[in-house]
Image (tube, grey):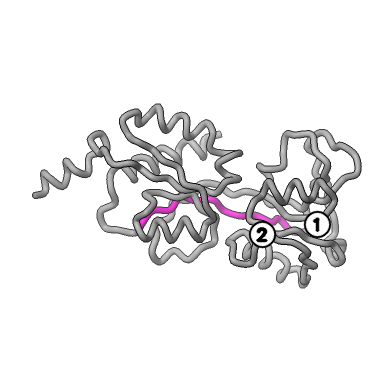
């Protein structure tokens, strides 16, 4: 029985589809090269990618619909095993009437956010929890005029002049744009990214192997 278990749990012979879940922003800006390398490293494995938000990804991992997920922390970890990856800064974004070039990030005072119209992620999202916790820390209730799940949609609405937002830095850099980037004076707003798999005494070897590969690929400088 043990030999059969070991054989069935051999990553080189596992023929089942491997389902990896991630958020759309991370997929666009972080996962291009790692996923190419992953497919090259595991040519015989059918790898599928599912896109969703952290809450959906964790539920899918716990229910065994997803083998591995890339999520934002903090998130309750009682039913999942978490492998930390990296921290990511969140920046304040405000519209610009003229085209902005370069990656300059200036600093604004927290008090300057008091009357700003905000476009934010929905209340149910992990990202919104991180942002709301920050607002609680500075004693501010944001004036939220619109909510959207998608970072790219929020970014375009900011560029169109509908309001301001707080978004992940990697979605904002290296492009000509119609918005300004700011840090908030005296505060460093961060979120943590991590891999998540179901908590079990015997994790599938393929899942562990792919998790180790992605951890190495995503954290190398």
Q: Nearer the viewer, residue 113 or 84?
A: 113
**Residue at x 79% of width, y 34% of height:** 176
Identify the residue at the far right of this view: 97
Residue positioned most to the left: 1
Horizontal side of 13 relative to 2 (left or right) equals right
* The image quarter in which residue 140 lies: bottom right
**Residue at image location 77% in from the left, 53% down from the top:** 92
Look at the magenta stretch and give its main secondary structure.
strand
Residue 77 locus on image (x, y percent): 44, 63
In 3D space, how far apart are the residues under numbered discs 1 and 2 (Cα atoms)?
22 Å
Label 1's element? Answer: loop
Task: Please tell me whether residue 70 is drawn above or below residue 29 in the rendered image.
Answer: below
Residue picked out by circle 2: 121
Q: Position of residue 177 (x, y in %)?
A: 80, 38
| Residue 82 horizontal/vertical position (percent) | 43, 55
Q: Is residue 159 magenta?
A: no
In the figure, residue 17 lies in which quadrant?
top left
Mark toward the viewer: 1 or 2: 2
Position of residue 140 in the picture relative to residue 215 (left or right): right
Residue at image point 45% right, 42% down: 49
Q: Are marks 1 and 2 in contact (CB under 8 Å)?
A: no
Residue placed under numbered mark 1 in the picture: 185
- Residue 148's x, y, as percent? 67, 57
Residue 156 versus residue 76 in the image, above or below: above
Classify mark 1: residues with Cα within 10 Å, few (<14), some (14-19) or many (20+). Answer: few
- In magenta, the rendered stretch is 187-198
* Secondary structure state at the residue bearing disc 2: loop
Residue drawn at x 83%, y 54% is 162
Could you tell which of marks 1 and 2 lies nearer the N-terminus? 2
């Amino acid at each position: 029985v043990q030999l059969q278990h070991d054989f069935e749990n051999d990553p080189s012979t596992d023929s089942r589809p491997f389902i990896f879940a991630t958020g759309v922003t991370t997929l666009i800006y972080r996962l291009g090269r790692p996923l190419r390398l992953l497919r090259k490293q595991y040519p015989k494995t059918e790898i599928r990618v599912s896109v969703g938000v952290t809450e959906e990804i964790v539920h899918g991992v716990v229910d065994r619909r997803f083998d591995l997920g890339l999520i934002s922390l903090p998130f309750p970890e009682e039913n999942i095993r978490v492998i930390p990856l990296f921290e990511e800064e969140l920046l304040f974004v405000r519209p610009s009437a003229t085209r902005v070039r370069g990656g300059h990030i200036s600093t604004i005072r927290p008090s300057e956010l008091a009357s700003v119209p905000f476009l934010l992620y929905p209340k149910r999202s992990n990202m919104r929890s991180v942002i709301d916790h920050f607002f609680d820390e500075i004693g501010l209730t944001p004036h939220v005029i619109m909510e959207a799940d998608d970072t790219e949609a929020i970014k375009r609405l900011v560029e169109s002049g509908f309001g301001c937002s707080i978004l992940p830095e990697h979605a904002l850099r290296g492009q000509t744009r119609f918005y300004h980037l700011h840090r908030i004076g005296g505060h460093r707003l961060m979120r943590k990214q991590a891999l998540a798999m179901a908590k079990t005494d015997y994790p599938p070897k393929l899942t562990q192997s792919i998790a180790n590969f992605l951890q190495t690929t995503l954290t190398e400088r």
